[in-house]
Amino acid sequence: MGSDSPLLRTPLAVISTVRLQDVLVVGLALLWLAVYRWVRVPPHLRHIPKVPILPLLRSYLSGEVEEQRVKRVILPFAEKARTNVVLVFIVGEWQVHVLEGKAGRQFMENRTLMKQQPPSHMLLWRLTGNQNVFMAEGEMWKRHANIVHEALRRSTPIEQFANLARKTFSLMGKGGRIRWNDYTHRFTLDAVGTTIIGYDFEALDKPDGVFVKKYHDVMDAISSPAYIFLPFLERWWPRHEVRRLVDEFVDDFRVLVENKRKDPGNDMLTYMFEDPEMTDVEFRDNAIVAFMGGHDTTAGALSSLVHFLGMHQDVQAKAREEVFAVMGSDDPSLEYFAKMPYLNAIVREAMRCNGPSNVTIPRLADVPLQVGDYVIPANTPIVLNMCAILHNPALWPSPSEFDPDRFTKMDKLDENLINFGLGPRQCPARNFSINEQKTLFSMLLREYRWTVPKDSIHRDYIKNGFSTFALSLPYDVDIDFVKIT
């Protein structure tokens, strides 16, 4: 090669730059190929309408809550595509989401379907375990479900709910501006503790108690949108400190169960001891699930309920009139609740507008399954998207409006009111939660009038915090209360 060769006249720095650019281009191309292969729809699912992937990715990585993602991305796509069955990419896979109650019953009432077991390395499931009524299958689930149903049947603790309501009012005093979601979490935590777990967390008396604080620390620590959307991160970059917090909290429940065995009472855990097949792990996992599911969901519902009535003074006044006419100054009871159709309608509408839980755990069928207009291939995750059903404009007139009268006009409940799931595995504590809400709500109406402050962050629409369990948990719900004299 002569001295006039172009290569010899090219500076080495330019050659290095060109080579670096080539490496970057190849690297980006390989990255794009990997992402494409990861998010592309498998051939056997391409007959089902697919929610666009880019809006979903932006939503997940931004930390948008489930309820807003459903309203902003999933429902508009379904409405445009004229379908109630869609494909949604989440937790690293494509799932079938069902957006209508009738189609939902086609798989939720099918006893051959099994719950999909979540990735074992996710800290969320390290916290809850999988040997409980929430996650178990087969004979284990039957044993747990029978015990839970029997425990809840033996007693309806409305008297205890009323006592906790009076304690709440004593803390509220003459009223003023109160962060209501703080009170609802404390109220429901003491309710589930004293009646289901058989342990007094003293959340109303000690809001900064060690147990309660540790729970909030754990939930804050594991609630990372990136780790929930990309669960493999837990294997690549494990969060050792968060894992330690989770394990310590789980061990606290192990000790709680041991103490309960020594000092039984009139609660669900005590009834579980009657089953000789129950293991220590099953006791612990069920205690944790009861603790988490039994207070967060109802607290969110009560926060939403009071907010909506603070925004709708006419509804609040009408409900108060009904409560005084039926209950007078008596304590609440099931008999009184049956005679208050407007109060019942308000509770239902509040849970429709901001349902405590948004989606079910995915189910799997080992054979193809007809759901709506589509045949779902075997081993495809299927989800009942409760939030989408409760806000589907094809099912509810003006779904964004709070209108309790939509339920006073019905002879029977709409099949699309599915806050607690569908089929044999819907939430066993449904009546427990509803009666807890009605008790506090009816007594609150007699004690206070309330409004939503003009500077509330919820004036336009109610805002929920990010939840690992895809729950609707309003935050910073400030309410102005005035004591009724």
Image: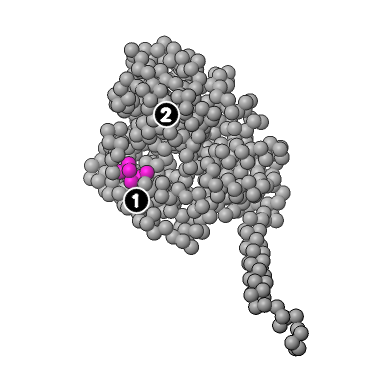
Secondary structure found at label 1:
helix
Identify the image quadrant of residue 437.
top left
Give the percent coordinates (x, y) of residue 392: 62, 33
- What's the magenta bit mostly, secondary-structure-wise? helix
Give the percent coordinates (x, y) of residue 208: 30, 39
Whichever of callouts 1 and 2 sits on the residue coming sooner in the sequence is: 1
Q: Which residue is mark 1?
A: 250
Q: Could you tell me which residue is drawn at 57 percent across and 32 percent down?
A: 390
Give the label on residue 358, or none.
none
- Residue stretch rendered in magenta on the structure: 211-216
Identify the image quadrant of residue 298.
top left
Q: Which residue is mark 2?
A: 478
Q: Could you tell me which residue is drawn at 36 percent across and 31 percent down?
A: 183
Mark 1–mark 2 contact, CB under 8 Å? no
Circle nearer the viewer, 1 or 2: 2
Can residue 291 be seen here? The reply is yes
Can residue 347 be seen here? The reply is no
